[in-house]
Image: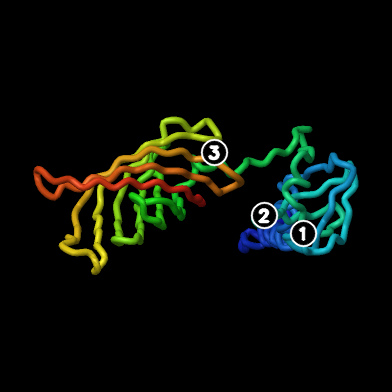
Amino acid sequence: MHACARHASHPLQCIALPLALLFLVLACADPAAAGEDDRLWLTVTRPYAEMHTGPGRGYPVFNIVSRGEAFTLLRQRADWLQVETADGKRGWMHRNTVEGSQGPGGERVQFGRAGREQWRDRRFEIGFAAGDFSGDPMFSFRAGYRVGPHFVVEGQLLQAAGSFSSTSAYHTNIQVLPFLDGRVTPFFSIGAGRISNEPKSTLVDAVKVDEWAGNAGVGVRAWLTRRFILRGDVRQYVLTRDINNNDDFTEITLGFSVFF
């Protein structure tokens, strides 16, 4: 007769031993083993790859990975990637060193470049510019938020100081980028804001202007390296104080922006 039949009055005894064995197997299993099996292993294709002790060229090289040897990626910090070799050594490689390594299917590793392509996936942009505001030197700060493939909502603060007056302004613009494929791309914008122009106290009968103003502009953006952009703008401001009296200001600037 089967052993379980002789202990029918205690049915839990029939499953206690299998459950105990199952828990023992699960407890002894290495939880990290499955994760390690899923890691992506790459093979060095250049003569050698240097491993640094930290994420920077100032950190010393402590290990050399030769052609044909394997390593896996752990994490990234800016242009540096932490790697681990097949024999367990951990260190940092520059992205240019890792790029071109061979994947498990024989494909070559290529990293995306932060520039035109990644800009399309990023939302925020800040920048500074300097230039001329109707003959006076000026400085401006701007911040933008991308709301679509071709549209950026941007706010700008500017300050200009000249021999006869000083000007401050804040305004919001909608920037339109019709073309995104080139390294240098044109754009145009339209917006509105507030301009305050205060004459020097030495001027006689000078009138302070503090009015709402509309503006329109054109410009170009040139992608330099990674997240940096060189940008040039030409913008025209129009203030309407009354039906027969308009004031015009022209802004010409050159500056840098960074997106993230």
Q: Is residue 191 at least partly visible in the picture? A: no
Mark drawn on residue 91: none
Would you call the spot at circle 3 few (<14 residues within 10 Å), some (14-19), or many (20 or more)? many
**Amino acid type at mark 2:** Gln
The x and y percentages for residue 249 are 29, 47
Labels 1 & 2 near each other (Cβ < 8 A) = no
In percent of the image, x 45 and y 34: which residue is there? Answer: 186
Would you call the spot at circle 1 few (<14 residues within 10 Å), some (14-19), or many (20 or more)? few
The residue where tag 2 is placed is 76
The residue where tag 3 is placed is 116
The x and y percentages for residue 31 are 71, 58
**Amino acid type at mark 3:** Arg
**Amino acid type at mark 1:** Arg
Residue 59 vs residue 135, the one in the foreground: 135
Residue 167 vs residue 177, the one in the foreground: 167
Q: Is residue 98 above or below residue 15?
A: above
The x and y percentages for residue 115 are 57, 42
- In this image, 30 relative to 173: left or right? right
**Measured Cα–Cα span from mark 2 to mark 3:** 21 Å
**Measured Cα–Cα span from mark 3 to mark 1:** 27 Å
Q: Is residue 167 above or below residue 178?
A: below
Looking at marks 1 and 2 on the same chain, the residue that comes earlier in the sequence is marked by: 1
Question: For the view shown, which residue lies furthest in the bottom direction?
Answer: 201
Q: Is residue 211 above or below residue 118?
A: below
Q: In the rendered image, which quarter is residue 177 located in?
A: top left
The residue where tag 1 is placed is 57
Helix, strand, or loop for circle 3?
A: helix
Looking at marks 2 and 3 on the same chain, the residue that comes earlier in the sequence is marked by: 2
